[in-house]
Image (spheres, rainbow, N blue to C red):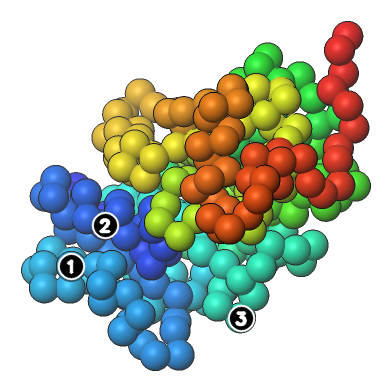
Amino acid sequence: MASSRTVCVMDASGHLGSALVHLLLHRGYTVHAALQPHPNGFQSVEELLPSSNKNLKIFDADPFDYHSITAALKGCCGLFYCFQPPSDHSTYDEFMAEIEARAAHNVLEACAQTDTIEKVVFTSSVTAVIWNESRTGSDLDEKNWTDINFCKKFKLWHALSKTLAEKSAWALAMDRDINMVTINGGLLMTPGLTITNPYLKGAAEMYEDGVFVTVDLRFIADAHICVFEDVSSYGRYLCFNHVINCSHDADKLAQMLLPSSDPSPPQRLLGEGEHLPSKNKQ
């Protein structure tokens, strides 16, 4: 039997996962915090999770180990799924898409086999929505999908990974009649964010198209819980609370992302690297 107030957060070691754990505990939930195995055990997340809280249970759950996933889900009515790259492959490259899609498939398959799960909130990204040959910009909505071949052509590995993982999750959710919603978030504004963040590949083109969006950690964590608790929620939700659409905002973000010694931060953020094709003006 599942408790109506017991949920699982996987992976709980990232910024969003740990924020969700704190908020859910504050709202009275019992939380199964599922963490990927770490060479030093759970010591690396002691500062992130309130280990003294009696309503918190910590699980060693590898997204590539089906049995460890089902153990973390046991007795839960809901899952908040936030993919964290494995410690031995933390860089987004052409192989990450396969890794992330396989993890998503494993987790949704485990949910299908767990008869207590009533709802899954799956964290995706705006990068799974915005990239295609036409570059339609502000005309995009939650019905749009990033083009996989476009991502491969221009090495948009973050977008490719998020798109394939979300498509894999939706395919299994629909096949197994799993109640799932996705949160497609903008660039997550967290401590330590730098220009090397893989979301930022194509920043100049996102800025040009009016789709360079960011989201605060508390805002997106609240959105996850809101769609979980709302029985009428369904489908995909674009989630952001700021649009970088003027030079002042671009300058401010560049100053945050780049070293203070950089002589031309806005140009580095919005002008360097391999450019994507010009926006279709038709």
Indicate the quadrant containing the C terminus: top left, top right, bottom left or bottom right: top right
Q: Which residue is mark 1?
A: 50
Residue tagged 3: 88
Q: Amino acid at mark 2?
A: Val
Residue at 42% across, 52% down? 190
Q: Secondary structure at mark 3?
A: loop
- Callout 2–callout 3 Cβ contact below 8 Å: no
Question: Dividing the picture into quarters, in which one does residue 92 lie?
Answer: bottom right
| Total count of labels | 3
Residue 246 visible to the viewer: yes
Between 256 and 81, the one lying in front of the other is: 256
Is 133 on the left or on the right of 6, as rendered? right
Mark 1 in CB contact with mark 3 (< 8 angstroms): no
Q: Position of residue 227 (x, y in %)?
A: 35, 33
Q: Earlier in the sequence, mark 1 or mark 3?
A: 1
Question: Are the two marked residues, 1 and 2, in contact with CB atoms closer than 8 angstroms?
Answer: yes
